[in-house]
């Protein structure tokens, strides 16, 4: 069932449908989130009461809405509370404009099979995008609250990243869950963005050394001297190991998000 808030012009219908999709205890949880008595929530859901704007705003946080969804929901509440026909007409017009804008955005998702260069630049601008993107393949991390806690990302940044990933089709939303989308991502080895991509994850690897979980990670750095012939042997071993690791990852169940960085490079230069 598609429970997009943009499909509703009556916020009480939205609240009731969300309740039908959630387990027992929904009304009590919503009451706690909005600072109401459970009896008042029942009063509202039965059509006999109204949320004020403060309660409505609290509800947007309870449902983990993004910025546009929150704006629309508050607009619907204002429309439902409006006391004159002229105000209702004005607010209804604004609601329809937001609905149309949302439909246009959704119609663009998935048109491109791969990410455009412009959107690649945004994706590789920081580690957050790839981390959230991959985390959305893990069933236990597919809600906004789980992503924020697991990846230690602020709500503001998380909303920004999720909005981007949704907009380009890398993830899709089903009710309160974020799932992998159909758009593909491929970065050519000669792309200028490859440097930023490596920098993002090397910096993240360094940061992980200072975290409590560092004892469960593997970090190794060394400067080596070896023959020219053995350099090629090391390269071959690394390539073979990478292929084996990828084969493991392909069939592995998505449960945790890990970073992987491998470097083997020449430090000196020929002096002939």
Image: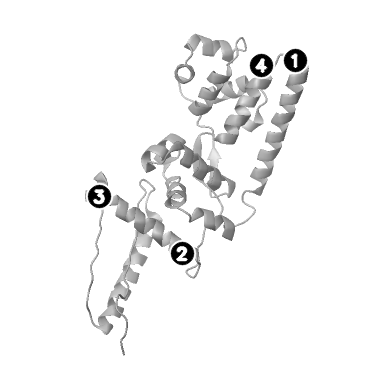
Tag 1 residue: 84
Question: What is the C-alpha distance between the residues marked 3 and 4?
Answer: 53 Å
Image quarter for residue 201? bottom left
Residue 242, horizontal then vertical, whole percent: 35, 66
Placement of the C terminus among the 4 image quadrants: bottom left
Q: Is residue 65 above or below residue 254?
A: above
Q: Is residue 107 above or below residue 55?
A: below
Question: What is the C-alpha distance between the residues marked 2 and 3?
Answer: 26 Å
Image quarter for residue 92? top right
218, 182: nearer the viewer:
218
192, 6: nearer the viewer:
192
Numbered tag placed on residue 81 in the rendering: 4
At x 63% / y 30%, what residue is drawn? 72
Label whose residue precedes the other's in the sequence (2 or 1):
1
Asked if residue 222 lies left or right of residue 167, the reply is left
Tag 2 residue: 194
């Amino acid at each position: 069932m598609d429970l997009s808030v943009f499909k509703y012009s009556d916020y009480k219908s939205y609240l009731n449908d969300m309740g039908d999709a959630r387990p027992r205890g929904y009304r009590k949880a919503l009451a706690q989130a909005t600072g109401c008595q459970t009896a008042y929530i029942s009063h509202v859901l039965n059509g006999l009461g109204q949320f004020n704007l403060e309660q409505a705003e609290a509800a947007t946080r309870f449902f983990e809405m993004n910025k546009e969804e929150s704006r629309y929901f508050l607009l619907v509440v204002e429309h439902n509370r409006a006391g004159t026909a002229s105000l209702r007409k004005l607010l209804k017009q604004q609601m329809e404009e937001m609905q149309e804008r949302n439909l246009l955005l959704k119609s663009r998702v998935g048109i491109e099979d791969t990410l455009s260069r412009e959107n690649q630049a945004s994706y590789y601008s920081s580690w957050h995008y790839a981390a959230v993107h991959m985390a959305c393949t893990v069933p236990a991390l597919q809600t906004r609250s789980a992503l924020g806690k697991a990846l230690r990302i602020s709500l503001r940044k998380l909303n920004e990243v999720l909005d981007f990933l949704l907009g380009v089709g890398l993830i899709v939303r089903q009710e309160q869950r974020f799932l992998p989308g159909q758009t593909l991502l491929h970065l050519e080895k000669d792309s200028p963005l490859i440097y930023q991509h490596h920098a993002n994850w090397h910096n993240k690897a360094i940061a992980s050394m200072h975290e409590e979980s560092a004892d469960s990670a593997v970090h190794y750095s060394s400067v080596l001297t070896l023959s020219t012939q053995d350099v090629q042997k090391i390269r071959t071993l690394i390539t073979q190991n990478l292929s084996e690791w990828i084969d493991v990852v392909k069939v592995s169940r998505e449960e945790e998000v890990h970073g992987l960085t491998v470097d083997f490079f020449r430090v000196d230069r020929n002096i002939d």
